[in-house]
Amino acid sequence: MTDHDARIRHSWQTNADAWTRAVREQRIESRRLVTDAAILGAIADGPSRRVLDIGCGEGWLCRALAQSGSECVGVDASAPLIEAAQAVGGGRFEVMDYATLIEQGSVLGQFDALVCNFALLDEYIAPLLGALRERVAPGGRLLIQTVHPWAACGDEPYADGWRLETFASFGGEFSASMPWFFRTLESWLALLAASGWRLRMLREPCHPDTGKPCSLLLELQPLAS
């Protein structure tokens, strides 16, 4: 585990209660107005009988999908977040980090939709992306929603590299900052192609008032072997 990996995991362990409250009380404007509905809409656009939520957090997406009749499995490296998800229900929830998902993911079976909703934070995700091809049922899809590179770049150079999320805009409950790896749009597309995925659709959900993109939403299918 790299130092960045350890810091990411520490952040989600430490901030688990604060994150759970922020999500369940709908404190995050971009999620409330745009991105939650965007990922739900993208899932609903295709097969979704079985859904794997990778980096599920406190389980909101699985709960929402279960109401529509989907069978949902949520995995996350943060044990406190999985405990919060299990306490409410709405799916099967397992503590599982990237490495475990790569090595033992076959026990979960295959899925119509794999979802990474603001969950791919590390630099070295190519092995995970490659392994996820084995978890897709015939005709299934991988859906990735992440920060929009152009919007998230801010005053920093538009180049791949580590950034720091302090959660300052979420209020004072978050005590541990989190490193995350910024990718340009070009880098995202190159990484996914090299990992064996074909881009099927690209969406840019926008804020209803500003008209600026709140996220980048990618729909992918495995390349033919």
Image: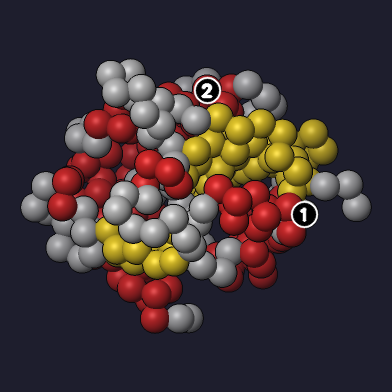
Relative image position of residue 113 (x, y in whole percent): 65, 37
Q: Where is residue 180 shown, x and y percent of the image?
A: 39, 62
Residue at 21% over, 59% down: 166
Q: In this orientation, does residue 156 appear?
A: yes
Q: Say left or right for 209 vs 190.
A: left
Q: Which of these two is toward me, 2 or 87?
A: 2
199, above or below 55, in the image:
above
The colour mode here is secondary structure
Badge 1 amino acid: Gly
Res 180 label:
none
Residue 42 located left or right of residue 148? right
Q: Which residue is mark 2?
A: 41
Whole-percent x, y for residue 74 in the image: 50, 47
Residue flagged by tag 2: what amino acid is it? Gly
Which secondary structure lies at badge 2?
A: helix
Callout 2: 10 Å neighbours few (<14), some, many (20+)?
few
Closer-to-camera residue (62/129): 129
Spatial CA distance of label 1 from label 2 is 25 Å
For the point 58% across and 64% down, the residue is 125
Relative height, residue 208 to residue 136 (above, below): above
Residue 196 picture location, percent across and down: 77, 54
Element assignment for label 1:
loop
Q: Which mark is residue 196?
A: 1
Mark closer to the observer (1, 2): 1
Q: Earlier in the sequence, mark 1 or mark 2?
A: 2
Q: Nearer the viewer, residue 107 or 37?
A: 37
* Residue farthest toward the left in the current orientation of the protein: 172
Total numbered circles: 2
Question: Which residue occupies the foreground of this view, 82 or 179?
Answer: 179
